[in-house]
Structure formats: C-alpha cells, structure tokens
C-alpha cells in the first residue's frame, strides 16, 4: 500500500535534487518563481476525465496517467507529475486515495477515481 507521506517525501527529494543541481548563475529569479502557477485546466475545471498516456495540464502543473491496474476493480494507477522544479515519474497511487504535494509554492491534493467510463482526475489547490 502506498503511503501519501511517501509521495510527499519523494516530491521533496526530487525538488531538493533539482535545486542542488542548479548553479548559482542558473538559479531561478524571484520573478520566475512567482510566474509558476497551478490553475484550472483549459476547460476552466479542477477535474477532468483522463485516458492512459494523456497529460492533464493545470497551468504549470502537468500530470500524466502512465499505467493502471487492468483488473475489474482498478486498485492502482501510475502517474508522472511535473512542474517547474518538480519531476516525479512512475509514482504508484491507489484508486480514490488522495495524494498531497507542493507545486509552484501551492499545496495541491490530487485524486484519481476510476469509474465505468474511465479515470476522473481531480485536484484541489490551497
């Protein structure tokens, strides 16, 4: 069973590794950091149906559904999460289990619920 705290730790490690690899000359400016935002998708929604391989874009936050359990109950899904300063690939989440992380300085909660007509991706930003 995947622990949401482990996901947050993975995101933190990825963000730290990314920051450590930057030289002082390549460090983002405060203006660049402020321009990074998590916003509603192109349809003006915080949720959308998503298919395998599809990338959902919420401003600078991108979430890709890479794989999912093909059993009739669909217990898990594999996602990639990317934003400026953040890249987590191949993270396994449970169907309907909320996952919390920080992107663009905002607290984000992500959940994917698989219904009969496909997976529904929903995010909340605080």
Image (tube, rainbow, N blue to C red):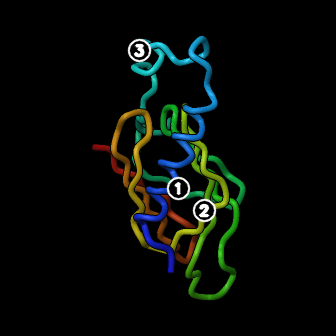
Mark in front: 2 vs 3: 3
Image height of 68 relative to 46, above or below:
below
- Secondary structure, mark 2, is strand
For label 1, the residue is: 10
Tag 1–tag 3 contact (CB < 8 Å):
no
Q: CA distance from mark 1 to mark 3?
A: 24 Å
Residue depicted at x 41% and y 35%: 39
Give the mark, 2 or 3, whose residue is nearer the N terminus. 3
Tag 1–tag 2 contact (CB < 8 Å):
yes
Estimate the x, y position of residue 95 in percent, counting from the top left. 50, 74
For label 3, the residue is: 30
Q: CA distance from mark 2 to mark 3?
A: 29 Å
Residue depicted at x 49% and y 53%: 48
Give the mark, 1 or 3, whose residue is nearer the N terminus. 1
For label 1, the crowd category at 10 Å Cα-Cα, with few meaning under 14, some 14 to 19 and many 20 or more, is: some
- Secondary structure, mark 1, is helix
Image height of 62 relative to 78, above or below:
above
Mark in front: 1 vs 2: 1
Estimate the x, y position of residue 29 in percent, counting from the top left. 47, 13
Image height of 116 relative to 105, above or below:
below
- Viewer-proximal residue, 63 or 16? 16
Q: Quadrant of residue 20?
A: top right
For label 2, the residue is: 91
Estimate the x, y position of residue 126 in percent, counting from the top left. 27, 43
Q: CA distance from mark 1 to mark 2?
A: 9 Å
* Mark carried by residue 117: none
């Amino acid at each position: 069973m995947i622990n949401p705290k482990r996901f947050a730790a993975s995101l933190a490690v990825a963000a730290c590794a990314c920051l450590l690899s930057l030289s002082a000359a390549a460090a983002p400016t405060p203006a660049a950091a402020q321009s990074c935002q998590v916003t509603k998708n192109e349809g003006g929604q915080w949720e959308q149906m998503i298919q395998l391989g599809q990338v959902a874009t919420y401003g600078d936050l991108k979430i890709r559904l890479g794989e999912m359990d093909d059993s009739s109950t669909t217990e898990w899904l594999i996602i990639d999460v990317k934003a400026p300063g953040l890249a987590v690939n191949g993270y396994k989440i449970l169907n309907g289990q909320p996952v919390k992380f920080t992107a663009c300085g905002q607290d984000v909660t992500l959940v994917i619920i698989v219904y009969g007509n496909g997976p529904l991706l929903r995010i909340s930003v605080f």
